[in-house]
Image (cartoon, rainbow, N blue to C red):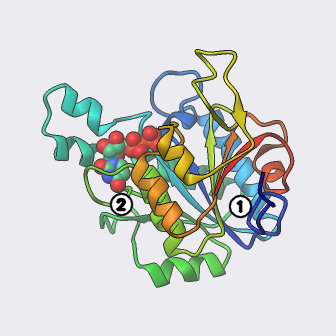
Amino acid sequence: MTEASDTAPGSTYKRVLLKISGEALMGDTGFGLHPPTVQRIAKEVQSVHATGVEICMVIGGGNIFRGLAGSAQGMERTTADYMGMLATVMNALAMQSALEELGVFTRVISAIPMDQVCEPYIRRRAVRHLEKKRVCIFAAGTGNPYFTTDTAATLRANEMACQAIFKGTKVDGVYDMDPVKHPEAKRYDRISYDDVLAKNLKVMDASAIALARDNKLPIIVFSLDEPGGFLGILAGKGTYTIVD
Ligand code: UDP
């Protein structure tokens, strides 16, 4: 095992990106948004924000629409992907509403301009929002079909000079096989980008992992059900896997 880097959990963060899937917002409902779940995640973000850490967020859209599912049903792929990107905007607006209810100032920043709804993505402007301690929720993915919000998260984390990506999932880290199907699955404390790619582990898609690797951006995978929450993980408590 290598020495922990100064961007590992437990170090002092100035700016981080939290990536959650759309499905994380649907609770047990099977589709769409579950307001109490959205509020619970917003509270976790609020508690980290209160410590002075600058926070970027990227939320997926899989609870509403996935491009691949659309194209499997005969829809043209790029159109289906745009629908998926629009789904992420809805999730971002729901999170904005929940955060502002808690008194946390936010901006939803879309890769696809829709000025009546949210801000367009302008890098310097987004950086300024972060400096002013506004939570920036990046919506509409990368703005391009054939990508995922994992790649969007890695792209924005690089552009915003975040020290790490925190990927909140249903499981408490990266396993050698699916821990839901295989109870004997082994969790990694730490794993390299190359091993994730070589073993084809389902952490993030390959383009996101490669982009993180090329820019030495650590990815910390943790469970959104972790008792100490996002705040605990940032402090290095609880269970997680670091990909670096
Ligand atoms: N999407 C896209 N380009 C992007 C990001 C997302 O086309 O840069 C589309 C794609 O169709 C994807 C959908 O948006 O299926 C929802 O995003 P994702 O699957 O990443 O959401 P998650 O699985 O994180 O909920």
Is the shortest distance between ligand 1 and the CB of mark 2 under 8 Å?
Answer: yes
- Residue type highlighted by circle 2: Thr
Coordinates of residue 169 in the picture (x, y in percent) = 61, 38
Residue matched to label 2? 142
Which mark is drawn over residue 219? none
Residue matched to label 1? 103
| Quarter of the image with the C terminus in it | bottom right
Q: Is residue 242 left or right of residue 217?
A: right
Residue depicted at 73% across the width and 34% down the height: 225
Q: Is residue 28 left or right of residue 3?
A: left
Residue depicted at 83% across the width and 65% down the height: 11
Check the image and report above or below for 1 versus 68: below
Coordinates of residue 215 in the picture (x, y in percent) = 52, 70
| Residue 85 appears in view | no
Coordinates of residue 192 in the picture (x, y in percent) = 61, 52
Query: Regarding mark 1 in the picture, which secondary structure is present there?
Result: loop
Q: Quadrant of ligand 1?
A: top left
- Residue type highlighted by circle 1: Gly
Q: CA distance from mark 1 to mark 2?
A: 28 Å
Classify mark 2: residues with Cα within 10 Å, few (<14), some (14-19) or many (20+).
many
Residue depicted at 22% across the width and 41% down the height: 80
Image quadrant where residue 228 sits:
top right
Q: Looking at the image, how many numbered discs can be counted on the residues? A: 2
Query: Regarding mark 2 in the picture, which secondary structure is present there?
Result: loop
Label whose residue precedes the other's in the sequence (1 or 2): 1
